[in-house]
Image (cartoon, helix red, strand yellow):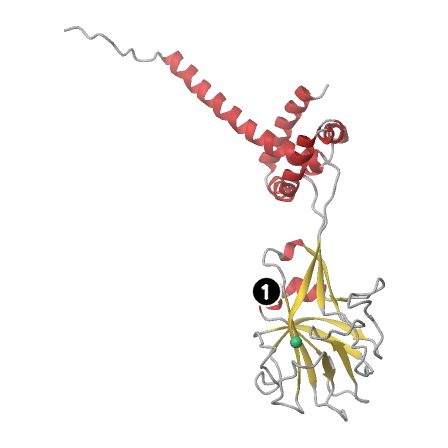
Amino acid sequence: MPSLWKEEPLKFESRISLNNMRARHHRARYQIVWCILLLSALVLTGGQSMAASVRCEDIADVSIDEWYPDENFNYKTRLVVATNKNIHHGIARALFRFDIPSDIEVAEIKSANIYLSACANCGGGNGGTVGFFALNKPFDEAADTWSSLEGGDWDDSVYSQAILPEGNSWNQAENGEPPPDVKGFDITPLIQDNLDKVRANGIMMRFLDEHQEPFTHQNVASRESTDPLDFSPRIIIQQKESICPAEVMFQEEPKTLHQLRRFRDQVLEKTPAGRTFIGLYYGCAPKISALLSANEDLRLQARTVLKRLLAIILP
Ligand SMILES: [Ca+2]
């Protein structure tokens, strides 16, 4: 019985044509995806740079004193650092731990400062040069003492130093918040070189010379202080500015950058949907920039696609 339907093999040219069609379809889909992603981030961030500052709260702090080796000082509203040639203290060291977000990476960090206030109602001290070190082990502010920590275990490989001022009125708070002219202590080297330990275990502040003469000590407010003239310790990390994808791709083509900004300002900004679009894609820009910076082929391809698209949408 003759077959009612006979499958004809495709001729060579037809197969080529089919393959070309599939390839074109694939390319078109690829281009659409890129157009959406890139154009979005471009027009939204074109010409803008973004820098973020992250405030990391003090989540534990306590000081330890070798003359009171078994006393836990967490009930104090102050943290004391002291040298051992002292009429009131043995060597005293202050420990802090801060809530540093897990998604902050070293490569993104531009600078970091620790902000401390003098303890306004605890008599102050003569201050001096202290170092900030990463701790090798975590601590328990509610239980640890000089003895339990054996004086503390810190990483000497990198530290940041600062001069704690004398007296009890420096960085005096206004209603428990830092004053407008607050001064931070730069701990960028410590944070950049030892971020994991600082995040996991915390920081030790101690006098760099703990045997200096004449003796010295100083107090800073602990997080337990409710004195409105004190504020709680904190770290502020400044992140690097991220270059927007448009600048990555068209840094040598100011005319194209201008076209993109014009589209953003004259088209997208004019409608609620466009503004929503801007909001949605704002966060994508740093990741797209990183991707484009790392891959030259991708950068060239994306540039070509976008220029074609711009030719269509812009008069
Ligand atoms: Ca505490």
- Point out residue 307 in the picture as x, y percentages from the top left corner: 66, 25
Residue occupying the point 77% across, 87% down: 212
Residue picked out by circle 1: 196
Q: Which residue is nearer to you in this view: 233 or 130?
A: 233
Q: Residue furthest top?
A: 2
**Up-down: is 263 above or below 72?**
above
Give whichever of 235, 250 is nearer the camera: 235
Which residue: 58% across, 31% down? 34
Is residue 121 rendered to the left or right of residue 108? right
Report which quarter residue 140 is drawn in. bottom right
Residue 284, can we see it?
A: yes
> Would residue 249 be seen by someone viewing this image from the given angle?
no
Residue drawn at point x = 67 percent, y = 21 percent:
313
Q: In the image, what residue type sits under mark 1?
A: Asp
Quarter holding residue 243: top right
Corner quadrant of residue 290: top right
Q: Count the marks: how many? A: 1
Question: Where's ligand 1: which quadrant?
Answer: bottom right
Is 33 positioned to the left or the right of 274 in the image? Answer: left
- Of all residues, the one furthest to the bottom in this rendering is 87
Q: Secondary structure at mark 1?
A: helix
Query: Residue at the location (64% across, 28% down)?
Result: 306
* Image x and y of residue 151, in percent: 62, 84
Residue 246, horizontal then vertical, whole percent: 69, 35
